[in-house]
Amino acid sequence: MLISKITSKDLFPTFNCSTEDARLNSRADLFPHAKPVFSLFQQSHIAKLLIATSYDGFAYEKVIADLLEDKLLERRKVLCYLTEQQSNTAKVFELWADKVNLCQQAIADRVNDSETTEDNDFLEYLVYPEKISEFMILVNQLNEFNLNQNCKILINSNSSINKMVYANEVSELALFGEQAQSFRNNSYDSKVQHLTAGHIHHAHSGYLLVKIDDLLIQPMLWFKLKQVLVSGVASWTNPSIVSNELKSEPALVDFKLILIGEREAISQLAEMDSEVSSLAASFIEFDSEFNVNQQRVANYLAYVDLLINENSLNSLTTCAQQQLLRSSSRWCEHNNYLSLNENRLLQLLTYANIISNQNKSEIISAADIHQVLHLQHQALNNHIKLSSEGVVEKQILLQTHGSSIGQINGLSVLELAGHPESFGEPIRITATGHLNGDGDISDVERKAELAGNIHAKAMMIIQGYFTHTFAKPLPLPINANLVFEQSYGEIDGDSAALAGSCALLSVFSQTPIKQNIAVTGAIDQFGNVLAVGGINEKIEGFYRICELQQQEDAKVIIPAANLVNLNLSPALVDAVNAGKLTILPINEVKEAIYLLMGKVAGELDDEETIYGIINKLADESNDDGYSDTITKLKTIYEKTIGKLAFRN
């Protein structure tokens, strides 16, 4: 049986680092599928709510701001309040945002004549023509003593150019503002200058961006925000005790709301309010990964250059670009994807920039990036050191030499609570049993309640594989135990299904397994080997143990479907080139049997093969007089029928 080995060129991805014809004007270009929908949302006069997915490290505020800039900005409006002295009522008006400075100056000069302004017509500042006369009457009432007390323009500092307001603080006051009060001359007073604008006022005629998580903490804020969004009316919260109460007209706010959060947060919001789905005009999913098959790598490198320029960092050499792309791809666990976790990318670039400056270099090299990754690994590998000590001191039994029946090295990935990274570690899987039972394969982890649901499913698939392979009128007469040795925490996942199956086949056929080979892979009931996660960590974990035990002929069997996930460290690439590590991709359980036991799986009627040996031993077990299950069932059946006939 010919099984190809993986060469060094297949151990890590390589990318074309040419930046010619890069087409990236902003972060928004990283999400081409989002642009058309966002444009429709902008142009619609009915759509008020858009929901977008987020992910860890996503610079959503910058991305959405870029998406807004892709469309020509319409003239922005802001709110203006003037007090009517007789009724002590604050009247609300709309002004053009780009005319605010001129309008403020005009009000300060108390003018009602267009000839005194720098613009053609002072009245052009107003949006609602029917309110022009009312506005001018109130302006004429202002004088140098009551100007500040009777005029309030609710804008933010960049309202003329900034169409999006980000709600970095979400509270009743921050979102909806308030009508405050002052204490003077032994009494409370409320005037127009006491109006404190909220996010909804600053976002008038623009966009308000809110994180869903902030609304889930305070559900009532969402329902109030939804009411204001739908009705377009935002009433002011009046002070509790005032002697001279100001009556403020409700603000007729007109804004579009963008909610952003992870899928789970969106789901919780929908459960909290069933109207969310019908109210939302659009849903946009921002990808957390850059697909190199759908977009050019040059665009991703242009994105990296954007981060470098924004943060005044040193540029990257071509080798450094390649190293950065490899690291980014490994974070995604797929060679066709690159990470868009901006926080993580920027952290790596910033650290590498510091090292390059320490080396008095004006560029970041691949060695600088590699040093950052090495230092981060050293700072986080105490758990790996403890694991290695356990192997060296023989407190953890892992055999990498010789061969054994019913014992195999499986590969696992350990995740520690509170630790940001997972790491690979081999685990000894053992099987015991005999061909004289009721067909049960006992999973000790599941019985001890140390296994998750996916692991339990994998064990059932193993039983289905044996039933399919050794098809008989009744299940294969086996009785076996399968154990993950020295495992004291919960185990989950199906990546040990291949290893467990091979351990059982070894026991039933009494054929030893080579211990210098580790195995990972899920299987289906027909013996096909399926892809698993954490493939790089698993291979690196096994090779670490082999180095500790001076095993210079280590081999790892992986699913062929995982070839696209290989992104190994330079140390393992060197080990493969030196012949100290061999990686063997397979597609079927039969291939693993040959590699592990040195015999082909074969056919049931060939007594020289693994399947044939097991089939023969199973037949002999049935013929020994102790397990003639068919005969027993026939006898029970006949007796039962006889009794029923007698009763009738």
Image: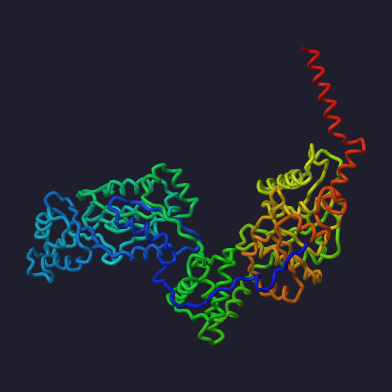
Q: Quadrant of the N terminus?
A: bottom right
Residue 344 can be seen in this image? yes
Q: Residue furthest top?
A: 648
Q: Is residue 81 above or below residue 450?
A: below
Q: Left of 518 or right of it: where is 46? A: left
Q: Residue at x 18, y 52 (%)?
A: 90
Q: How is the image coloured?
A: rainbow
Q: Is residue 238 visible?
A: no
Query: In the displayed image of the protein, which residue is found farthest to the bottom?
Result: 360
Q: Nearer the viewer, residue 593 or 367?
A: 593
Which of the two residues, 27 or 425, is positioned nearer the viewer here?
27
Q: Which residue: 55% across, 78% down?
A: 320
Q: Position of residue 94 (x, y in %)?
A: 20, 57
In this rendered view, identify the residue nearer to me: 616 or 449. Answer: 616
Q: Position of residue 491 (x, y in %)?
A: 69, 52
Q: Position of residue 235 (x, y in %)?
A: 26, 48
Q: Quadrant of residue 397?
A: bottom right
In the image, residue 354 sits, relative to residue 65, either above or below, namely below
Left or right: where 456 falls relative to 232 = right
Q: Is residue 579 above or below residue 407?
A: below
Depth order, front residue of 307/210: 307
Residue 472 in the image: state x and y as whole percent: 79, 40
Q: Quadrant of the C terminus?
A: top right
